[in-house]
Image (spheres, grey):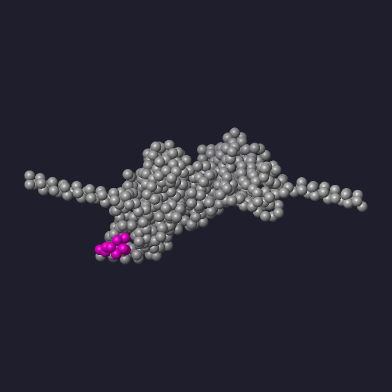
Amino acid sequence: MKRILIIGITTAAIFSSCKKDDTPEYNPNVKADLSVEFDNVAGAADLQMNTATYNNAAGESFKVTKLKYYVSNFVFTNSNGTTYTVPQKDSYFLIDESDPAAREAELQVPEGEYKSVSFIVGVDSLRNTMDVSQRTGVLDVAGTASDMYWGWNSGYIFFKLEGTSAASMMGGVFQYHIGGFGGYSSSTANNIRKITLDLTARGVAKVKSGKSTNIHLMVDILKALNGTTNMSFATLPMVHSIAPGTPVANNYVSMFTHEHTEN
Amino acid sequence: MVMYRKYLWVIVVLIAGVSACNKEITAEYESFRGFVQPSNFPQPFYRFGNNAVTKERFELGRKLFYDPLLSSNNTISCGSCHIQTSAFTHHGHAVSHGIFDRMGTRNSPPIMNLAWSTSLMWDGGIVDLDLQPIAPITNHVEMDDSMPNVLNKLRNSSAYPALFQKAYGSPEITSTGFLKALSQFMLMCVSSNSKYDSVMRNQALFTAEEQEGYQLFRQKCNTCHTEPLFTDHSFRNNGLPPSMVDDPGRYLVTQKPEDRYKFKVPSLRNLSFTAPYMHDGRLFTLDAVFDHYTTQVQHTPNLDPLFLVNAQPGLAISAAESQKLIAFLKTLNDRSFLLDKLLSEQ
């Protein structure tokens, strides 16, 4: 009897300790580092700007000379079903392929296990209409954002893909500038796109203080050109206003995939 | 000698008069009153809560407005195409020539009563006055510079860090400080002292002809050129035949077919000083404007329905009525605005 009791206690102790190891204790009142990495690729190859030649679905070959896009308004869904919205002021990032320091969104979220992430490609309408004093950091129109802003039709450019292609009749150059938050007083096309990615298949994010968790996303720029509408540099070499950018925005909702999570 | 003495007196009196004038101007200047709401105007559209006008910020804005440092080769200032003596337009220029004499496609609009403007530019592409200067600074044919470069030039100048310190309490030159100072200067460009304003404030009377013109104006023009700002801030196609440029106007901003060829209704204040007229400055005289509205209106897409009430597109205005209307319209001129030293390059 005593022996059984001892075995029982030991088993219980083992199980409970096992349980402890399985589920680290998260303190939702403590915030910890979580980064989202935007790894720009072209199909199955890492994106090489200026040097590598790619082909679009229209059969045109091209090189990429510039790739920049805003990601903002991050929301994370905990495995327990609750969501955490990153405070908006800390939620704007400009991903710039030419700058190795500008390929990650570095965030602080409450400790916990997260099963999905969502964000928007672009800058929300609220920030697009805010007082200039609220446009700081990557949104500073005289700083980082000076290259990502339409002065003549006020609003941020969400996504810029530029390059060269013999198919373009505009001096062999193509420029796709996508923007349009819906307009101030009169409505315009809205090219803000929300992306939601499930993390369960390739690794949930286990965020805990003292370590840094990284959600690694692949961003296939070929999918910005090929998809619902196959873009052609021969027929449309330049996009510099809102409405013509909509097909590209509709394409690039599919360019983000979750590769893995480094916990 | 007697004669000379007489002249001497005249000279003494003249000098006294001039110095008195100077004193008056100085006194007015010393007591900077900030933005003053004209009693016969509606509430401003601009959110002054985000940018309360102060003397130091206004003066910084004025210096920036007249500084060619804002252009890529330091030759063109805001004041180059917005000249005070022409109510801050580019008098005599259908379209303006900017940097390297590159030509634009639209007529330089007056910088006047912008505190009440619900949008800026002929196509309304900009809503927030604070963001307006970015457009001419970065436009290839206007100042052709970049915002970061302009701010760097200011940072490296001898004068500006101290002026920003005075205005904002820090020598740091930020886009917010820069843009809001320019807004302060533009907001202070208020024209509200025309004869029309005096009549509305019961300080003067129209002549009989002006009064008749006013009645006609209220019948035929006031729907779009609404008192007291003489614009309803809307976008309309007034039937100009498209030019070689084929500027689609508001369509560029909204990309809606129903906005093609629509342009903002301009204010009529100071119209004697703001020729040429229309979005591309194609009409040089007021007579040409009346000629357009009475006989030249073309039925292009989206022509405003107001021009379609008669057998022929346009407005029914007789020659006699035109003269009365012009008499009234001239009461919208405000010379004090053109001469206000506060708004001049110092």
- Extreme top residue here? A51
- Residue beneath the point at 43% across and 37% down: B156
Which residue is found at the position 59% from the left and 51% from the top?
A87
| Residue A232 percent coordinates (x, y) | 58, 44
Residue A98: in magenta span: no
Residue at the farthest right position: A1
Comparing A211 with B76, the one in front is: A211
Q: Is residue B328 above or below residue A54?
A: below
Name the residue: 50% across, 42% down: A143
Q: Position of residue A214 (x, y in %)?
A: 66, 43
Q: Is residue A176 visible?
A: no
Does residue B88 appear to the left or right of B174 in the view shown?
A: left
Residue B170 at least partly seen: yes
Where is the N terminus of chain B found, in terms of image quarters? top left
Picture residue at 64% right of the left edge, 37% below the top: A46
Query: Does residue B31 appear left or right of residue A122 in this picture?
Result: left
Work out whether residue B303 or residue B71 is closer to the camera in this orientation and state it: B71
Question: What range of the chain is rendered magenta?
Answer: B197-207
Main SS, magenta region, reads loop
